[in-house]
């Protein structure tokens, strides 16, 4: 493989699986808001 | 003052069913149940057989740049819009648009029904491809396709030689797996969102990732794999000045993510009210892109191997061989599988992956139809599965289990995807962002429930960039299709299976809003509140059909809206 195609492969891996890992970690660290707007008592969640 | 009634949707009258008490909507088991189901929907046949070939044809490695731009400026923003619509209005596509519309909601409901009809037409042919994949999974063990894989597909398996369309003689070899696919799909739908859709995805997606992962890793070590990858990832930066490359990138992201035709909207409606929406959306979007890259690695490693076996360069191979779609999967791949060491395992992994990826997408498409029927006609999940599944399965068997299946599939696929879905997306964004101007409300909804803000940039992208790009794609596609019949097929087939299908979808979508809802669709409280939308003074009045529904009295044990208004005005808790 040429140097440029290897570079683009690395970019692809950094963006897609890298983005997946980053977004999953972000979600795992902050899965929900610390506090949601109050839910009216008669409204099902 | 707010309308304090519980949310409409779900629950049969006096029949709690599995949804708990009447009025309670089905829900995912939790955040990851939703995420894995949404990934199952997004990751489909297109990831495996479309992305690698499109990338190769549009600048190779350089295609990553427009792909990333398209993901960030259209894919993820439209995904968030789908989530906001379904989650805020707690309903299937027709119900969500009906609630969006309020006073003049009758016609807006048509947008939702059009999305349902698009799903209907996609489901009937999508299942046929899964039936082919199931057959080829079995054929892999003895490589029944032989040397002439094209002849085997069209001559022996599909028996399509010389047949250009219509409902003709059935083909038992296609009918049997197709009937089986439909039986399993209807059973999954009948089990409901949590016990059916989510459970199926929880089993299928890990198996898919492992099976396809093994296939990709093995393919990377084939002789010639590096040549294939080199041809895929070598960037042609000059291609970035070509508008058609950018259009291809937007189209690929758009078709790949299952956005704007009701799926993500419907899935989001089954999330709890207090649910993070945006971070799971990012996980789904990047998981989809990751699978595309994974498919690119696998497919082009295998094509590189094939080129070496044939003594060709990759450019020569791409000229002489199908590298996308049905041709790639059912003509090119069987040929290369036969030449591989461990052909049976390799073939089974590929066609098994195709089957699993497609099946999880099929059930998401069916959930759009099933959810709409449950909301509109007050059906339980099993009844909706049967009312939807039997007609869809019969049409699917009649149109695609016959000798004309391949031609029918090609035409219906082209028009429902490239005209129907894109039209649905453009209309959805224009209606939400420009006609009803709900951009601020939805960005408030997403921000209030999520862990990062969604503000003016998102509104700019969904309100201007995405509609303009998709509108351009739509106009160019329609002009191209009007110029000459698609694929050289007979005019009558294109008119019936192409324009006719899209037109029928639009016609049904215009008629169904005339059918009254089982309960007042506006009898609903959005959470979290935004501005004065839930104030009684601002609440839009009922139109005739909905007033008639309301006048029939309580449905599902719930009080009428007028009664509640009265009780609230008296200071009583309903």
Image (cartoon, coloured by chain):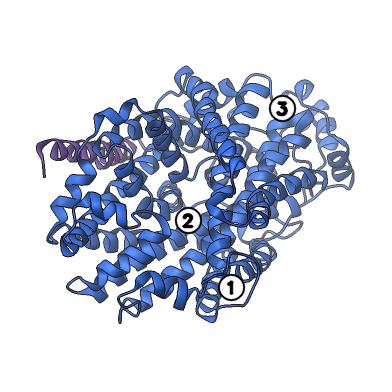
Chain colours: A purple, B blue
Q: Secondary structure at mark 3?
A: loop
Quick one: label 3 or label 2, which is nearer the N terminus? 3
Which residue is at 36% across, 46% downward?
A: B288
Disc on the earlier residue, 3 or 1: 3
Q: Is residue B37 above or below residue B329?
A: above
Q: Quadrant of the N terminus of chain B?
A: top right
Q: Depth check: B527 or B246 in front?
A: B246
Where is the C terminus of chain B found, in terms of image quarters? top right
Badge 3 is on which residue?
B2
* Residues at discs 3 and 1 in contact (Cβ within 8 Å): no
What residue is disc 1 on?
B402
**Res. B71 image quadrant:** top left
Q: Residue at x 64, y 73 (%)?
A: B168
Q: Is residue B6 visible?
A: no
Image x and y of residue B207, in percent: 33, 63
C-alpha distance separating marks 3 and 1: 56 Å
Where's residue B563, x and y in %? 85, 37
Q: Which residue is mark 2?
A: B361
């Amino acid at each position: 493989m040429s140097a440029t195609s290897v570079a683009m492969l690395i970019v692809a891996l950094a963006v897609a699986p890298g983005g997946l890992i980053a977004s999953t970690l972000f979600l795992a660290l902050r899965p929900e808001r610390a506090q949601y707007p109050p839910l009216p008592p008669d409204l099902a969640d | 003052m707010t309308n304090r009634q519980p949310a409409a949707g779900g629950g049969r009258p006096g029949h709690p069913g599995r949804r708990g008490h009447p009025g309670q909507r089905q829900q995912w088991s939790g955040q990851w149940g939703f995420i894995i189901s949404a990934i199952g929907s997004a990751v489909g046949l297109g990831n495996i057989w479309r992305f690698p070939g499109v990338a190769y044809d549009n600048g190779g490695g350089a295609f990553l740049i427009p792909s990333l731009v398209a993901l960030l400026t259209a894919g993820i923003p439209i995904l968030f819009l789908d989530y906001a619509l379904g989650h805020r209005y707690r309903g299937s596509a027709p119900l969500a648009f009906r609630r969006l519309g309020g006073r003049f909601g009758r016609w807006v409901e048509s947008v939702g029904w059009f999305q349902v009809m698009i799903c209907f037409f996609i489901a009937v042919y999508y299942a046929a491809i899964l039936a082919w994949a199931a057959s080829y999974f079995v054929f892999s063990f003895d490589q029944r396709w032989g040397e002439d894989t094209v002849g085997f597909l069209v001559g022996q398996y599909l028996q399509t030689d010389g047949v250009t369309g219509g409902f003709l003689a059935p083909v038992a070899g296609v009918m049997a797996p197709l009937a089986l696919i439909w039986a399993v799909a209807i059973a999954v739908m009948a089990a409901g969102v949590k016990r059916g859709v989510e459970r199926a995805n929880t089993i299928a997606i890990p198996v898919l990732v492992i099976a396809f992962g093994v296939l990709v890793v093995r393919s990377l070590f084939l002789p010639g794999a590096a040549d294939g990858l080199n041809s895929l990832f070598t960037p042609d930066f000059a291609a970035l000045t070509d508008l058609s490359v950018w259009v291809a990138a937007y189209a690929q992201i758009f078709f790949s993510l299952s956005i704007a035709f009701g799926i993500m909207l419907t899935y989001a409606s089954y999330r709890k009210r207090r649910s993070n929406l945006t971070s799971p959306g990012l996980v789904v979007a990047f998981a989809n892109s990751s699978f595309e890259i994974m498919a690119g690695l696998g497919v082009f490693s295998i094509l590189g191997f094939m080129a070496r076996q044939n003594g060709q360069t990759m450019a020569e191979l791409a000229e002489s061989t199908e590298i996308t779609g049905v041709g790639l999967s059912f003509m090119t791949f069987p040929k290369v599988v036969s030449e591989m060491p461990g052909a049976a395992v390799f073939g089974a992994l590929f066609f098994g992956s195709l089957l699993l990826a497609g099946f999880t997408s099929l059930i998401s498409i069916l959930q759009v139809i099933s959810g709409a029927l449950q909301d509109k006609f007050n059906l339980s999940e099993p009844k909706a599965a049967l009312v939807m599944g039997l007609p869809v399965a019969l049409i699917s068997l009649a149109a695609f289990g016959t000798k004309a299946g391949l031609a029918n599939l090609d035409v219906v696929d082209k028009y429902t995807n490239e005209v129907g879905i894109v039209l649905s997306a453009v209309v959805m964004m224009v209606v939400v962002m420009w006609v009803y101007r709900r951009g601020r409300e939805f960005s408030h909804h997403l921000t209030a429930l999520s862990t990062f803000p969604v503000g003016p940039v998102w509104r700019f992208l969904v309100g201007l960039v995405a509609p303009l790009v998709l509108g351009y794609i739509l106009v160019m596609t329609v002009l191209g299709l009007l110029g000459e019949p698609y694929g050289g097929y007979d005019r009558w087939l294109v008119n019936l299976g192409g324009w006719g299908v899209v037109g029928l979808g639009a016609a049904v979508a215009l008629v169904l809003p005339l059918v009254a809802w089982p309960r007042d669709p506006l009898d609903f409280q959005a959470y979290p509140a935004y501005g004065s939308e839930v104030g009684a003074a601002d609440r839009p009045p009922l139109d005739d059909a909905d007033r008639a529904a309301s006048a029939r009295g309580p449905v599902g044990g719930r009080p009428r809206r007028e009664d509640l208004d009265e009780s609230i005005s008296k200071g009583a808790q309903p």
